[in-house]
Image: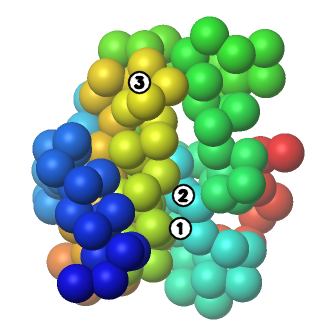
Amino acid sequence: MSAIDDLLAQARSTLDRVTPEAADALRGQGAVIADIRPHENRSAEGEIPGSVAVERIHLEWRLDPGGDHRLPGFDADTPVVVVCNEGYASSLAAADLRRLGLRRATDLVGGFRAWAAAGLPTGPGGGPAVP
């Protein structure tokens, strides 16, 4: 097993990962869906309606529940579902958010592509990410 495989397994052991259908239910209950995919992927494939595009390099600053640069409207108990292309980078990112104090941070199994394959709603992508 490689070092990244070990790191991924360790990150996932701290998460209650969600299926696309469970993520959709959480979205309906007010969870933050944080899309960390690059602009090019969001433009080409679309986005989950109501998701917040946050480039990976800004994620911790924008979702730190006690940070000065955090997005409004959430706290440490708000469910956050991190979405990437296929559910790998999102696992690492969600584990980082847990370390920041977001107790209910998790990620989407299979990423955006699993969401789309499940026939769940998508909208046009390509809007700017939250700076």
Residue type, mark 2 in image:
Asp
For mark 3, does the 10 Å Cα neighbourhood hold few (<14), some (14 to 19), or many (20 or more) residues? many
Placement of the C terminus among the 4 image quadrants: top right
In terms of depth relative to the viewer, which is nearer, 82 or 97? 97
Residue type, mark 3 in image:
Leu
Which dot marks residue 47? 1
- Whether residue 129 is visible: yes
Residue type, mark 1 in image:
Glu
Which mark's residue is nearer the viewer, 1 or 2?
2
* Residue at image coords 15%, 44%: 16
Which dot marks residue 35? 2
Estimate the spatial distance between the alpha carbons at disc 1 and disc 3, rounded to whole Å: 23 Å
Placement of the N terminus among the 4 image quadrants: bottom left
Which mark's residue is nearer the viewer, 2 or 3?
3
In terms of depth relative to the viewer, which is nearer, 25 or 78? 78
In terms of depth relative to the viewer, which is nearer, 45 or 79? 79
For mark 2, does the 10 Å Cα neighbourhood hold few (<14), some (14 to 19), or many (20 or more) residues? many
Q: Is residue 32 above or below residue 69?
A: below
Estimate the spatial distance between the alpha carbons at disc 1 and disc 2, rounded to whole Å: 8 Å
- Where is residue 82? Give x, y as percent: 43, 52
Task: Tell me which numbered mark, 2 or 3, is placed earlier along the sequence.
Answer: 2
Q: Mark 3 — residue? A: 102
- Where is residue 112? Give x, y as percent: 39, 73
User: Disc 1, disc 2: CB below 8 Å?
Assistant: yes
